[in-house]
Image (cartoon, helix red, strand yellow):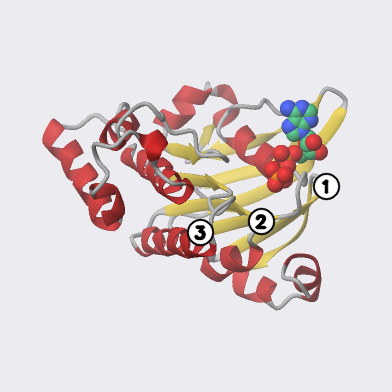
Amino acid sequence: MGMLEVKDLQVFYDNIQALKGISLEINEGEVVSIIGANGAGKTTTLKTISGLITPKSGSIIFEGKNLLKEKAHNICKLGIAQVPEGRRIFSQLAVKDNLKLGQFTVKDSAEKKEEDRANFYKVFPRMSERKNQSAGTLSGGEQQMLAMGRALMSRPKLLILDEPSMGLSPLFVKEIFEVIKHLKEKGTTILLVEQNAKMALSISDRAYVIETGEIVLEGKAKDLLYNDRVKKAYLGG
Ligand code: ATP
């Protein structure tokens, strides 16, 4: 059984059906991506998993627990951390305090929490130099790193990333993907939503292609990179 099992999700916004029966599965240690065009339903899928949207029908089972019976803050406590599209860091607070907020639900000693933060600074040296700076003064790419760091501070079992490369310069996109690769090597389970299909597929184990609320293709990321339909629609021919 997978760590996360999503079955036949149907989601409506008023009378518009955004998800028409989405099913997907993530196993421990996997990086799985969802690719698709604007408005396909990627963000809606993620928000439903993290409890921000209630589906009309379907099921979401995480480590054997039915998430549809849990409130969003409990889902976070169960070990799912989502980095939303557009980041949402606390811009008035210092970088280090943003990280500390991510540790709110961690039940461990202050020393261990400090160790977690130190590990983050090791992976993101750029953040170390900016610990005391207010987060709002960071560049877009740095804010994305901080948002990922804050999510990681909660020691999630499943890290969900919504469009981490959005709006970033090519150099930062590369850097963000390097970080995701590093997390993967450490065994972090990741669900990734990306417009940048090429990058996403190149670091994922498996992927799902979503079009107008439905999964139209799924498979090993390596195979999808060479799939004609994927190439035409998402990889620029
Ligand atoms: P993008 O990459 O542009 O964010 P997406 O694949 O994440 O796209 P969703 O944001 O999940 O797509 O949107 C799926 C569909 O649901 C779209 O048609 C969108 O217009 C609609 N939708 C999303 N949020 C709402 C809302 N709050 N109210 C009404 N319709 C919505």
Identify which residue is drawn at 43% across, 62% down. Answer: 175
On screen, residue 57 above or below 4: above
Mark 2 close to ligand 1, CB under 8 Å: yes
Mark 1 close to ligand 1, CB under 8 Å: yes
Q: Residues within 10 Å of mark 3 (few under 14, many from 20)?
A: many
Front position in the image: 129 or 110 = 129
Q: What element carries label 2?
A: loop
Q: How crowded is mark 2: few (under 14 residues within 10 Å), some or many (20 or more)?
A: some
What separation in Å lies between label 3 and label 2 (alpha carbons)? Answer: 16 Å
Residue occupied by mark 1: 212
What's the mark number on residue 195? 2
Front position in the image: 72 or 144 = 144
Identify which residue is drawn at 43% across, 43% down. Answer: 143
Quadrant in which residue 98 is drawn: top left
Amino acid under label 1? Thr
Indicate which label's residue lies in the foreground, 3 or 2: 2
Q: Which of marks 3 and 2 is nearer the N terminus?
A: 3
Camera sees residue 11: no
What separation in Å lies between label 1 and label 2 (alpha carbons)? Answer: 15 Å
